[in-house]
Amino acid sequence: MSFAIAIDGPAASGKGTLARRIAEHYGFHHLDTGLTYRAVAKALLDRGAPLDDEALAADIAAALDLSVLDRDVLSSHVFGEAASKVAVMASVRRALVESQRRFSQRLPGAVLDGRDIGTIVCAQAPVKLFVTATPDVRAGRRAMEMRRNGDETSYDAVLQDLKKRDARDMGRKDSPLRPAHDAHLLDTSEMDIEAAFRAAKRLIDTALSDRDGH
Ligand code: C5P
């Protein structure tokens, strides 16, 4: 039987780092579902197509191969912005959710992180985490990460940008960003990755032993 772990939260909340750490510890597959929206956005930009060409975007989404998502290329800021525009289109979401659901059934288990994993993609997941941090902390982390990659964007610009993206992700009609009713909230504002991992591990170990009947 497969075992899915759903991790949601806003940009730069620490959910991706946590998801990778969990997947590595348990030997589970990991999918950063943000990359799937970014890949569709990049394909549209590469073709010079408008980001709201829903028919083309849905075709690209339906044909997307999850095994070739390149984090280094897709992590660029322009694709994040473009992805949050592509992500408002219902037919794009339908196509991507279908392949994300298939991924979540991989054995022995799968960790998926995104915005709608606990609410839509894996609504039956035995473990759901909603990872948050204050906008200030998130902007600080993101600005530092960008400086490490040689991008000198100011903290204020990053903060404004995150707030805009949060508003778009939380305000959209289809699958808005929000915690599932049965998600565990994890505020990482004053927590490092190991502390967040320890909190998650307690929940996961309990769910795994419940599944195995002891
Ligand atoms: O997490 P990341 O910054 O890579 O996501 C890029 C954008 O893709 C998000 O701002 C959001 O609009 C969209 N997204 C989504 N649902 C997901 C993952 C990402 O709508 N499950």
Image (cartoon, helix red, strand yellow):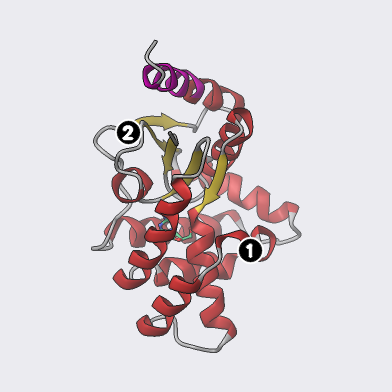
Tag count in the figure? 2
Q: Pick the residue in front: 38 or 170.
A: 38
Question: Which comes sooner in the sequence, label 2 or label 1?
Answer: 1
Is residue 206 inside the magenta stretch?
Answer: yes
Q: Is residue 189 above or below residue 160?
A: above
Left-right relation of 46 to 110: right
Q: Position of residue 126 (x, y in %)?
A: 36, 31
- What residue is shown with label 2? 183
Q: Position of residue 123 (x, y in %)?
A: 30, 43
What is the number of the mark on residue 68? Answer: 1
SS at circle 2: loop
Q: Which residues are magenta?
A: 201-211
Most extreme residue toward the bottom is 48
Does the numbered disc 1 mark a residue whose Cβ is under 8 Å from ligand 1? no
Q: Is residue 93 above or below residue 11?
A: below
Q: Residue at x 55, y 78 (%)?
A: 43
Q: Is residue 213 above or below residue 111?
A: above
Quadrant of the image for the C terminus?
Answer: top left
What is the number of the mark on residue 177? Answer: none
Q: Residue at x 61, y 62 (%)?
A: 69
Query: Which of the 4 image quadrants contains residue 94?
Result: bottom left
Q: Residue at x 31, y 41 (%)?
A: 179
SS at circle 1: helix
Ligand 1 found in image quarter: bottom left
Dot 2 amino acid type: Ala
Q: Residues within 10 Å of mark 1 (few under 14, many from 20)?
A: few
Query: Which of the 4 image quadrants contains residue 183?
Result: top left
Q: Pick the residue in front: 4 or 136.
A: 4
Q: Residue at x 66, y 62 (%)?
A: 70
